[in-house]
Image (tube, grey):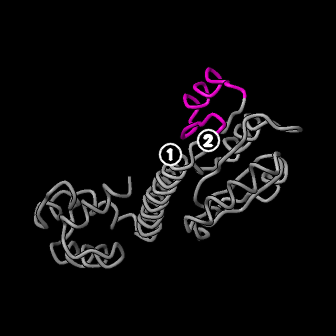
Amino acid sequence: MSLPQQAYLVDDDEAIRDALTWLLKSRGMPCTAFDSAESFLAAWHKEMSGCVVLDMRMSGMSGLDCFDHLRERQSTLPVIFLTGHGDVPLAVATLKKGAFDFFEKPLHDNELVTRIEEAMALDARQRAANATVDSVKARISKLTTRERQIMELVVAGKFNKVIADELNISMRTVEVHRANLFDKMQVKTAVELANLLKSGG
Protein backbone atom coordinates (compact mmCIF):
# COMPACT_ATOMS: atom_id res chain seq x y z
CA MET A 1 0.00 0.00 0.00
CA SER A 2 1.44 3.39 -1.01
CA LEU A 3 2.17 5.98 1.64
CA PRO A 4 0.45 9.40 1.40
CA GLN A 5 2.02 11.57 -1.26
CA GLN A 6 4.75 14.03 -0.42
CA ALA A 7 7.76 15.75 -1.94
CA TYR A 8 11.16 14.34 -0.96
CA LEU A 9 13.75 17.15 -0.99
CA VAL A 10 17.35 16.01 -1.35
CA ASP A 11 19.94 18.82 -1.15
CA ASP A 12 23.14 19.22 0.85
CA ASP A 13 22.65 23.01 1.08
CA GLU A 14 20.82 23.65 4.37
CA ALA A 15 19.57 27.09 3.30
CA ILE A 16 17.96 25.67 0.15
CA ARG A 17 16.47 22.72 2.05
CA ASP A 18 14.94 25.07 4.62
CA ALA A 19 13.65 27.47 1.95
CA LEU A 20 12.05 24.68 -0.11
CA THR A 21 10.56 23.03 2.97
CA TRP A 22 8.99 26.33 4.01
CA LEU A 23 7.77 27.00 0.45
CA LEU A 24 6.06 23.64 0.06
CA LYS A 25 4.56 23.56 3.53
CA SER A 26 3.21 27.10 3.00
CA ARG A 27 1.36 25.69 -0.06
CA GLY A 28 -0.04 22.81 2.00
CA MET A 29 2.26 20.25 0.38
CA PRO A 30 3.76 17.61 2.71
CA CYS A 31 7.51 17.20 2.33
CA THR A 32 10.51 15.53 3.94
CA ALA A 33 14.06 16.88 3.52
CA PHE A 34 17.30 14.89 3.29
CA ASP A 35 20.81 16.35 3.46
CA SER A 36 22.40 13.76 1.16
CA ALA A 37 21.62 11.24 -1.54
CA GLU A 38 22.88 8.50 0.77
CA SER A 39 20.40 9.38 3.54
CA PHE A 40 17.52 9.49 1.05
CA LEU A 41 18.43 6.13 -0.49
CA ALA A 42 18.70 4.62 3.00
CA ALA A 43 15.15 5.81 3.74
CA TRP A 44 13.70 4.97 0.32
CA HIS A 45 11.21 2.15 -0.11
CA LYS A 46 8.80 1.28 -2.90
CA GLU A 47 5.70 2.41 -0.99
CA MET A 48 6.87 6.05 -1.13
CA SER A 49 4.65 8.14 -3.39
CA GLY A 50 4.82 11.73 -4.61
CA CYS A 51 8.03 13.01 -6.20
CA VAL A 52 11.73 13.64 -5.55
CA VAL A 53 13.30 17.09 -5.82
CA LEU A 54 16.98 16.23 -6.21
CA ASP A 55 20.04 18.48 -6.28
CA MET A 56 22.29 17.52 -9.16
CA ARG A 57 25.63 18.24 -7.48
CA MET A 58 26.19 17.34 -3.83
CA SER A 59 29.16 16.41 -1.70
CA GLY A 60 29.30 12.63 -1.49
CA MET A 61 26.97 10.88 -3.93
CA SER A 62 25.74 13.16 -6.71
CA GLY A 63 22.11 13.58 -7.64
CA LEU A 64 22.83 11.84 -10.94
CA ASP A 65 24.20 8.77 -9.14
CA CYS A 66 21.20 8.83 -6.79
CA PHE A 67 18.90 8.92 -9.83
CA ASP A 68 20.68 5.89 -11.30
CA HIS A 69 20.30 4.02 -8.00
CA LEU A 70 16.56 4.80 -7.94
CA ARG A 71 16.17 3.46 -11.47
CA GLU A 72 18.10 0.30 -10.54
CA ARG A 73 15.64 -0.19 -7.68
CA GLN A 74 12.79 0.30 -10.18
CA SER A 75 11.52 3.38 -8.34
CA THR A 76 8.64 5.03 -10.20
CA LEU A 77 8.87 8.32 -8.26
CA PRO A 78 9.11 11.26 -10.70
CA VAL A 79 12.39 13.16 -10.22
CA ILE A 80 12.86 16.92 -10.61
CA PHE A 81 16.52 17.98 -10.68
CA LEU A 82 17.89 21.22 -9.27
CA THR A 83 21.17 22.60 -10.56
CA GLY A 84 23.10 25.69 -9.56
CA HIS A 85 25.84 25.23 -12.13
CA GLY A 86 24.05 25.89 -15.39
CA ASP A 87 24.48 22.23 -16.36
CA VAL A 88 21.76 22.43 -18.95
CA PRO A 89 23.21 19.74 -21.29
CA LEU A 90 23.55 17.40 -18.30
CA ALA A 91 20.01 18.20 -17.17
CA VAL A 92 18.64 17.58 -20.66
CA ALA A 93 20.45 14.23 -20.67
CA THR A 94 18.64 13.29 -17.44
CA LEU A 95 15.29 14.05 -19.11
CA LYS A 96 16.20 11.55 -21.82
CA LYS A 97 16.98 9.02 -19.08
CA GLY A 98 13.52 9.53 -17.58
CA ALA A 99 13.74 12.51 -15.21
CA PHE A 100 10.52 14.53 -14.96
CA ASP A 101 12.08 18.02 -15.23
CA PHE A 102 14.94 20.24 -14.08
CA PHE A 103 15.26 23.74 -12.67
CA GLU A 104 18.26 26.05 -12.50
CA LYS A 105 18.93 27.89 -9.25
CA PRO A 106 17.87 30.48 -8.27
CA LEU A 107 14.46 28.86 -8.46
CA HIS A 108 11.19 30.38 -9.59
CA ASP A 109 8.92 29.35 -6.70
CA ASN A 110 5.58 29.19 -8.51
CA GLU A 111 6.91 27.26 -11.50
CA LEU A 112 8.64 24.74 -9.25
CA VAL A 113 5.53 24.19 -7.11
CA THR A 114 3.41 23.74 -10.24
CA ARG A 115 5.79 21.12 -11.64
CA ILE A 116 5.93 19.29 -8.30
CA GLU A 117 2.11 19.17 -8.31
CA GLU A 118 2.16 17.83 -11.89
CA ALA A 119 4.79 15.22 -10.96
CA MET A 120 2.64 14.10 -8.03
CA ALA A 121 -0.43 13.86 -10.27
CA LEU A 122 1.56 11.70 -12.72
CA ASP A 123 2.74 9.47 -9.86
CA ALA A 124 -0.86 9.05 -8.63
CA ARG A 125 -2.06 8.09 -12.13
CA GLN A 126 0.76 5.57 -12.57
CA ARG A 127 0.08 3.97 -9.18
CA ALA A 128 -3.65 3.72 -9.89
CA ALA A 129 -2.92 2.05 -13.25
CA ASN A 130 -0.46 -0.36 -11.63
CA ALA A 131 -2.96 -1.21 -8.91
CA THR A 132 -5.55 -2.04 -11.59
CA VAL A 133 -3.08 -4.26 -13.43
CA ASP A 134 -2.16 -6.08 -10.20
CA SER A 135 -5.83 -6.52 -9.30
CA VAL A 136 -6.69 -7.99 -12.71
CA LYS A 137 -3.69 -10.34 -12.58
CA ALA A 138 -4.75 -11.52 -9.12
CA ARG A 139 -8.27 -12.29 -10.38
CA ILE A 140 -6.98 -14.13 -13.46
CA SER A 141 -4.67 -16.22 -11.26
CA LYS A 142 -7.77 -17.68 -9.52
CA LEU A 143 -9.26 -18.99 -12.76
CA THR A 144 -9.07 -22.65 -13.72
CA THR A 145 -7.57 -23.63 -17.07
CA ARG A 146 -11.06 -24.22 -18.48
CA GLU A 147 -12.31 -20.84 -17.20
CA ARG A 148 -9.37 -19.13 -18.92
CA GLN A 149 -10.19 -20.92 -22.19
CA ILE A 150 -13.80 -19.79 -21.93
CA MET A 151 -12.73 -16.24 -21.00
CA GLU A 152 -10.69 -15.96 -24.21
CA LEU A 153 -13.65 -17.14 -26.29
CA VAL A 154 -16.14 -14.90 -24.48
CA VAL A 155 -13.89 -11.88 -25.05
CA ALA A 156 -13.60 -12.88 -28.71
CA GLY A 157 -17.39 -12.37 -28.86
CA LYS A 158 -18.41 -16.02 -29.21
CA PHE A 159 -21.79 -17.27 -28.00
CA ASN A 160 -22.16 -20.11 -25.49
CA LYS A 161 -23.25 -22.58 -28.19
CA VAL A 162 -20.16 -21.83 -30.31
CA ILE A 163 -17.92 -22.11 -27.24
CA ALA A 164 -19.51 -25.46 -26.35
CA ASP A 165 -18.88 -26.76 -29.89
CA GLU A 166 -15.27 -25.50 -29.98
CA LEU A 167 -14.41 -27.02 -26.59
CA ASN A 168 -16.53 -30.14 -27.17
CA ILE A 169 -18.49 -29.65 -23.94
CA SER A 170 -22.18 -29.13 -23.18
CA MET A 171 -23.92 -25.75 -23.20
CA ARG A 172 -24.75 -26.27 -19.51
CA THR A 173 -21.05 -26.77 -18.68
CA VAL A 174 -20.18 -23.56 -20.55
CA GLU A 175 -22.86 -21.68 -18.61
CA VAL A 176 -21.51 -22.93 -15.26
CA HIS A 177 -17.90 -22.05 -16.15
CA ARG A 178 -18.98 -18.69 -17.55
CA ALA A 179 -20.87 -17.87 -14.32
CA ASN A 180 -17.84 -18.85 -12.22
CA LEU A 181 -15.56 -16.85 -14.50
CA PHE A 182 -17.70 -13.69 -14.23
CA ASP A 183 -17.90 -14.13 -10.46
CA LYS A 184 -14.14 -14.47 -10.03
CA MET A 185 -13.43 -11.55 -12.40
CA GLN A 186 -16.12 -9.46 -10.64
CA VAL A 187 -17.97 -8.54 -13.84
CA LYS A 188 -21.56 -8.96 -15.03
CA THR A 189 -21.21 -8.84 -18.82
CA ALA A 190 -18.80 -9.86 -21.59
CA VAL A 191 -18.26 -6.15 -22.38
CA GLU A 192 -17.24 -5.45 -18.77
CA LEU A 193 -14.87 -8.41 -18.91
CA ALA A 194 -13.25 -7.18 -22.14
CA ASN A 195 -12.83 -3.66 -20.74
CA LEU A 196 -11.36 -5.01 -17.51
CA LEU A 197 -8.78 -7.07 -19.39
CA LYS A 198 -7.83 -4.00 -21.49
CA SER A 199 -7.35 -1.89 -18.34
CA GLY A 200 -5.22 -4.64 -16.86
CA GLY A 201 -2.82 -4.42 -19.74
Residue 27: % across, % down: 55, 64
CA separation, marks 1 and 2?
Answer: 8 Å
| Residue at image point 82% right, 55% down | 42
* Disc assigned to residue 107: 2
* Towards the viewer: 1 or 40: 40
Horizontal side of residue 193 vs 44, given as left or right: left
Horizontal side of residue 88 vs 42, given as left or right: left
Q: Amino acid at mark 1?
A: Glu
Q: Which residues are magenta?
A: 85-106
Q: Secondary structure at mark 2?
A: loop
Q: Amino acid at mark 2?
A: Leu
Residue 142 occupies quadrant: bottom left
Residue under pointer 1: 111
Q: Residue furthest top?
A: 89
Q: Secondary structure at mark 1?
A: helix
| Residue at image point 50% right, 45% down | 111
Rendered view: 89 above or below 94: above
* Disc assigned to residue 14: none
* Towards the viewer: 115 or 110: 110
Residue 90: % across, % down: 65, 24
